[in-house]
Image (cartoon, helix red, strand yellow):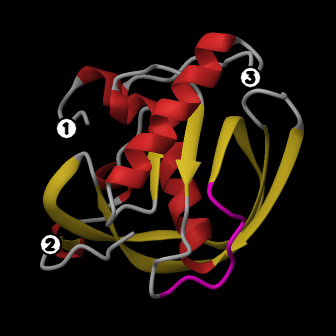
Amino acid sequence: MLGAPHPLLTAVAEPVDPTAPEVVAAAADLLATLRRARSTTGLAAPQIGLSLRLIAFDARRHPRSRSWAGELVVANPRLASAAHWDEGREGCASIIGLTADVRRATRITVHGHLPGTGEAVTIEADAIEARCIQHQLDHLDGLLFLDRVPGVLSLHRRLHTCDA
């Protein structure tokens, strides 16, 4: 797993052909990495050293989870709608020891494709799942959650591992 300030974490990831064998292999690797990172609800391909527009997420174990789209990898995800903005605490597997209060939509719709089949998928998420997905979308655009922090008073030392 790459840690900040690795340059790949601040670069825009490349669109992918979701049916390409190398993309399917990358999706499998991303999902396997997410499964090993037990306290993490999502990962983006740049976090594992791949400049590809792939995200993986699974919010079912998070104590504040309400929606659950499943354990998914999505290729070329794009935010279609966002509503009901609120501040919430976030952490990141690529930034050890810090969390921050970040303003994000609590209800979102995301369109993308499933690796392997290329089938179009629409995800409607709320609460922590929506926050997690938006966090991963930021990674694809070269943004870290720290880029969304309004000021130093929003930063916190990480005291436990169940942050988003």
Q: CA distance from mark 3 to mark 1?
A: 26 Å
The amino acid beneath tag 3 is Pro
Residue at (54% x, 80% y) in the render = 86
Q: Is residue 60 magenta?
A: no
Q: Quadrant of residue 112?
A: top right
Q: Quadrant of residue 127?
A: bottom right
- x and y percent of residue 150 in the render? 32, 64
Q: Earlier in the sequence, mark 3 or mark 1?
A: 1
The disc at residue 3 is 1
Between circles 3 and 2, the one closer to the viewer is: 3
Q: Is residue 66 magenta?
A: yes
The amino acid beneath tag 1 is Gly
Q: Local crowd at mark 3 within 10 Å, few (<14), some, or many (≥20)?
A: many
Residue at (49% x, 23% y) in the render = 12
Between circles 3 and 1, the one closer to the viewer is: 3
Q: Quadrant of residue 53?
A: top right
Whether residue 114 sits left or right of residue 158 in the image: it is right
Whether residue 43 sits left or right of residue 48 in the image: it is right
